[in-house]
Image (tube, rainbow, N blue to C red):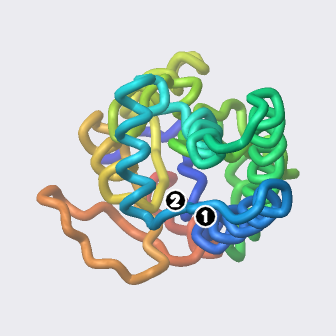
């Protein structure tokens, strides 16, 4: 028998929207603006990014969960040749503003907005994200009681900090009364499962389940989510 669900939490990136095209465009547009200011920059590849990230975390552990700071510091490293320092810092701040604006130029998956509006009539809704997108920049933000990012949690899923903070936002809700919805098998599904939280897996790419615990119920279209929740938790 499923416990009564009182609160539903959602991941953001790749759960409410397809994040890859958004991030790629934000990255390309921001780099173009930077190079318009200072000339060609050696950006490196993804492995270079990972190596630089690890180096930066060694210098400042907060960068592991403060991805906005991470991005700024990467810009700063890539612009190490720019002088004076004041000019470099001004370019970094402006570049980040451009990036974060572009990062919010998303397209919700079909059915997201209608589904969230309907669910908000019956449940407390919240956001648990490792990213730096702000749900309150969108119209559907009004349906969410809270949004917790890695910056607020000072940690990242699949660690439990986001989920503990979620309970602290509300009264009379336990993990047993909570449903978490996300796309990531580790950061969302494992994290929730490990705490005894009900979970639904958003799997719109027909991915294989690769974990050693039972696959949760899944859905591939937001247009079906309301009925899935109704059938599973409201009977």
Residue in the foreground of this view, choosing between 62 and 197:
62
Asked which secondary structure carries label 2, the reply is helix
Q: Position of residue 6 (x, y in %)?
A: 54, 36
The answer to the question of whether label 2 and label 1 lie on touching residues, with beta carbons closer than 8 A, is yes
In the image, taking residue 186 as reference, residue 41 lies left or right, namely right
Q: Position of residue 123 (x, y in %)?
A: 64, 41
Give the image quarter of residue 61: top left
Quick one: label 2, few (<14), some, or many (20+) residues within 10 Å? some
In the image, taking residue 37 as reference, residue 42 lies left or right, namely left
Question: Of the numbered discs in the image, which one, if any, rests on residue 229?
Answer: 2
Q: Which residue occupies the extreme bottom position in the image?
A: 206
Q: Is residue 20 among what the camera can see?
A: yes
The residue under label 1 is 226
What residue do we see at 35% from left, 28% from top?
58
What residue do we see at 46% from left, 52% from top?
233
Asked which secondary structure carries label 1, the reply is helix
Q: Position of residue 9 (x, y in %)?
A: 55, 43
What residue do we see at 53% from left, 27% from top?
166
Q: Is residue 8 among what the camera can see?
A: no
In the image, taking residue 153 as reference, residue 31 lies left or right, namely right
Q: Position of residue 181 (x, y in %)?
A: 48, 53
Q: Which residue occupies the extreme left position in the image?
A: 212
Residue in the foreground of this view, choosing between 214 and 14:
14
Relative to residue 217, is residue 122 depicted above or below?
above
């Amino acid at each position: 028998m499923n416990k009564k669900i009182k609160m539903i939490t959602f991941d953001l990136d790749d759960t409410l929207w397809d994040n890859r095209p958004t991030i790629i465009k934000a990255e390309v547009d921001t780099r173009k603006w930077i190079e318009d200011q200072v000339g060609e920059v050696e950006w490196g590849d993804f492995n270079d990014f990972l190596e630089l990230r690890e180096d930066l975390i060694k210098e400042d552990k907060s960068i592991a969960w403060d991805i906005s700071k991470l991005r700024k510091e990467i810009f700063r490293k890539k612009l190490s040749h720019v002088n004076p320092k004041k000019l470099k810092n001004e370019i970094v701040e402006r570049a980040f503003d451009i990036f974060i604006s572009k990062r919010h130029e998303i397209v919700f998956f079909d059915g997201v907005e209608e589904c969230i509006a309907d669910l908000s009539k019956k449940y407390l809704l919240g956001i648990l994200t490792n990213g730096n997108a702000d749900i309150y920049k969108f119209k559907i933000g009004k349906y969410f009681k809270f949004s917790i990012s890695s910056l607020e949690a000072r940690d990242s899923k699949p660690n439990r900090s986001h989920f503990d903070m979620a309970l602290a936002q509300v009264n009379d809700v336990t993990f047993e009364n909570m449903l978490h919805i996300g796309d990531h098998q580790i950061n969302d599904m494992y994290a929730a499962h490990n705490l005894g939280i009900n979970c639904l897996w958003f799997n719109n790419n027909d991915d294989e389940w690769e974990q050693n615990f039972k696959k949760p119920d899944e859905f591939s279209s937001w247009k079906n989510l309301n009925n899935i929740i109704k059938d599973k938790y409201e009977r």
